[in-house]
């Protein structure tokens, strides 16, 4: 890539009420104009090098944990080419619909490298997830019977936990106790017992209570809450709690920060043991989305809008 002259810099227009910010992008104005001459606008340009670097940051941060899987949230960027890049970096796919399941399969992501979490789920989507061998993550206690009717209960099944008032949300995702998603603590105890009676032998626990969160301490607190609950459930019900899935929600800053929080910051605050509690069994998993492919203020971002007619100077 040729060295850019400052006069050739691309300036991104801010949202209303925000100060003007100059972002350094991995191409010149002349190169953008050349691309625009070939491809209709608006379009996106993806920085593969930055995407791979972000992905490797996550993998390095959690490399010591056996069975750890990064599930990329496909809904954050449902592009099969980007998904193939992340698959090559060792990522799985976090899917919430049949099209996302099919996209994951198309790029070669199958089996337990898919985490399927949805709500108001049609029977055919449960069947599709079961066909692919995905980890089916139930969003509501009523989904137990719905899954059983659709395709039977698989050997491995996970449940989504809503901590209610025990855990605050943030301005984007709202308060957990006001959300329709997830099992309450008491419902989890009932639900896992029912799943065990229906033939499940391996179990997972999932939660996601924030979106675009920049404070690493928030995720440490969430991890502690969920791991302690996983241990309690496993002991009380005598089940194999095999995995804990900490949903994404890691944000990217709109403005430059003195030190950008990232997976390394989360890892360093947690020490050698997730949240400082005994692991239920073996696997910790996380489902990042925009934190993998999004723009970061400290270096080239991975997603750049080259031209958008809706943006006005």
Image (cartoon, rainbow, N blue to C red):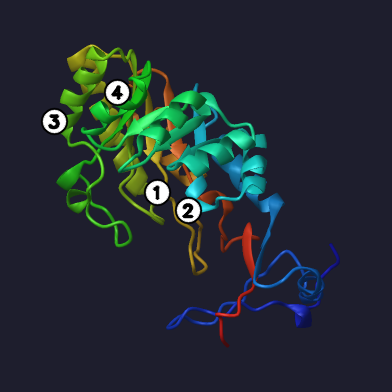
Quadrant occupied by the N terminus = bottom right
Q: Which residue is mark 2?
A: 261
Q: Which residue is mark 3?
A: 186
Q: Residues within 10 Å of mark 1 (few under 14, many from 20)?
A: many
Label 2 to label 4: alpha-carbon separation: 42 Å
Direction from residue 178 to residue 300 in the image, left or right: right
Q: Residue at x 29, y 62 (%)?
A: 171
Direction from residue 33 to residue 222 in the image, left or right: left
Q: Residue at x 22, y 46 (%)?
A: 167
Q: Which mark is residue 163?
A: none
Comparing labels 1 and 3, the label whose residue is closer to the camera: 3
Q: Are marks 1 and 2 in contact (CB under 8 Å)?
A: yes
x and y percentages locating residue 62 in the rendered image = 51, 33
Q: Is residue 221 above or below residue 253?
A: above
Comparing labels 3 and 2, the label whose residue is closer to the camera: 3
Q: Are marks 1 and 3 in contact (CB under 8 Å)?
A: no
Comparing labels 4 and 1, the label whose residue is closer to the camera: 4
x and y percentages locating residue 139 in the rendered image = 29, 38
Q: Secondary structure at mark 2?
A: loop
Q: Which residue is mark 1?
A: 216
Write down the quadrant of residue 155 in the picture.
top left
């Amino acid at each position: 890539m040729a060295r850019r002259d400052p006069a050739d810099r691309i300036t991104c227009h801010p949202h209303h009420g925000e100060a003007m910010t100059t972002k350094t992008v991995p191409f010149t104005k002349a190169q953008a104009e050349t691309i625009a001459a070939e491809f209709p606008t608006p379009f996106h340009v993806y920085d593969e090098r930055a995407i791979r670097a972000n992905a490797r940051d996550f993998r390095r941060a959690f490399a010591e944990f056996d069975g750890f899987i990064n599930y990329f949230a496909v809904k954050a960027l449902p592009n099969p080419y980007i998904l193939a890049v992340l698959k090559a970096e060792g990522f799985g796919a976090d899917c919430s619909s049949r099209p996302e399941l099919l996209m994951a399969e198309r790029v070669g992501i199958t089996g337990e490298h898919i985490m399927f979490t949805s709500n108001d789920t049609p029977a055919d989507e449960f069947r599709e997830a079961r066909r692919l061998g995905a980890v089916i993550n139930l969003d509501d206690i009523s989904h137990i019977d719905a899954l059983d009717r659709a395709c039977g209960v698989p050997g491995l099944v996970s449940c989504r936990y809503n901590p209610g008032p025990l855990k605050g949300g943030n301005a984007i995702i709202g308060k957990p106790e006001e959300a329709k998603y997830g099992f309450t603590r008491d419902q989890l105890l009932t639900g896992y017992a029912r799943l065990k009676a229906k033939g499940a032998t391996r179990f997972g626990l999932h939660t996601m209570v924030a979106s675009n969160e920049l404070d690493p301490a928030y995720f440490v607190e969430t991890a502690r809450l969920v791991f302690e609950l996983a241990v309690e459930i496993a002991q009380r019900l005598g089940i194999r709690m095999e995995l804990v899935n900490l949903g994404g929600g890691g944000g990217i800053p709109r403005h430059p920060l003195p030190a950008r929080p990232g997976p390394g910051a989360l890892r360093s605050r947690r020490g050698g043991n997730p949240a400082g509690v005994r692991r239920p069994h073996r696997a910790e998993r996380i489902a990042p989305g925009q934190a993998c492919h999004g723009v970061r203020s400290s270096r080239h971002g991975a997603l750049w809008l080259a031209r958008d007619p809706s943006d006005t100077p």
